[in-house]
Image (cartoon, rainbow, N blue to C red):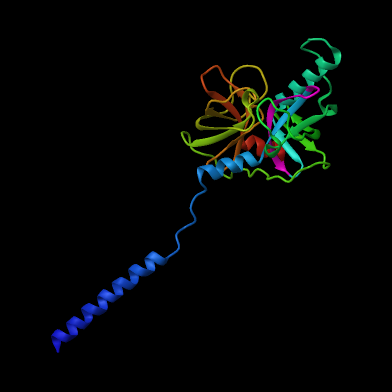
């Protein structure tokens, strides 16, 4: 009888262990992190190309922007001043550094990824907006777009935390006219400012190690979940080193 009781207890214990193992396997796991490709697509979906028409069928991309609302695009202030200077030279026919039109009165055109037909090709469509606000100190500007012709689009999500130094980040822009170029980089440092004159150098900045170039200006810097953490301001003489306006500056100024 005693042997029978011991055997019965052993069987029950084995069944119990198997039951616990089964439940552990069936317990749903935590949702997986967003994949690298999904993060890049998310970043690209909130990005626009700022384009300018110099003549008939001569459209070029000069800067990048990021959707921050249904009808507002965030970009760099120096992109707007650069465009104002270029239009001023076109209208006057003179190549003088001081010439520029009023940035608040100039037309601003943009195009979306779906309307991009390739490098050096005119986009399938261009849309119109105007300057809403600009900050030279922060090197930030907001473009208000017209509702006519507005296409459906995603809106950037501002990150609630910043990546650690060394963590991977995503840069989206249009360097040298190459629409929607996706680049991986890493946070090299956080800076409270940089020496020298120029917009965006006296504020909180993110130093990024990534192969970015002219045309990335005004474009977004995104974390591994595709959330916005910075706006491209300027590049340095150090190889593959760019400076982005920090999320905190963006958050404070935009609000």
Q: Is residue 152 above or below residue 14?
A: above
Left or right, 247 with respect to 122, comes to left
Residue at 47% across, 36% down: 167
Q: Quadrant of residue 77?
A: top right
Residue at 17% across, 82% down: 6
For the C terminus, the image quarter is top right
Counting from the top left corner in percent of width and height, residue 130 is at: 81, 33
Q: Is residue 23 above or below residue 133?
A: below
- Front residue of 206/4: it is 4
Counting from the top left corner in percent of width and height, residue 181 is at: 59, 31
Q: Is residue 19 magenta?
A: no
For the N terminus, the image quarter is bottom left
Q: Which residues are magenta?
A: 54-69
Residue 225 visible: no
Residue at 70% across, 40% down: 67
Residue at 61% across, 37% down: 247
Counting from the top left corner in percent of width and height, residue 170 is at: 55, 35
């Amino acid at each position: 009888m005693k042997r029978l009781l011991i055997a019965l207890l052993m069987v029950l214990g084995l069944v119990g262990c198997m039951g616990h193992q089964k439940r552990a396997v069936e317990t749903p796991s935590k949702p997986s992190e967003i994949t690298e490709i999904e993060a890049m697509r998310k970043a690209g979906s909130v990005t626009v190309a700022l384009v300018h028409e110099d003549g008939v069928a001569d459209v070029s991309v000069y800067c990048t922007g990021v959707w921050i609302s249904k009808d507002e695009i965030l970009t760099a202030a120096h992109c707007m001043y650069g465009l104002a200077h270029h239009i001023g030279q076109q209208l006057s026919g003179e190549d003088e550094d001081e010439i520029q039109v009023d940035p608040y009165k100039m037309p601003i055109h943009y195009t979306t990824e779906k309307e991009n037909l390739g490098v050096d090709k005119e986009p399938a469509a261009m849309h119109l907006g105007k300057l809403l606000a600009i900050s030279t100190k922060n090197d930030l500007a907001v473009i208000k777009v017209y509702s006519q012709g507005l296409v459906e689009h995603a809106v950037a999500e501002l990150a609630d935390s910043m990546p650690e130094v060394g963590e991977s980040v995503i840069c989206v822009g249009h360097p040298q006219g190459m629409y929607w170029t996706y680049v991986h980089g890493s946070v090299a440092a956080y800076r409270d400012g940089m020496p020298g004159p120029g917009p965006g150098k006296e504020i909180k900045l993110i130093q990024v190690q990534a192969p970015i170039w002219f045309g990335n200006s005004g474009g977004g810097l995104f974390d591994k979940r595709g959330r916005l953490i910075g706006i491209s301001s300027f590049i340095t003489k150090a190889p593959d080193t760019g400076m982005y306006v920090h999320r905190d500056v963006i958050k404070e100024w935009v609000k």
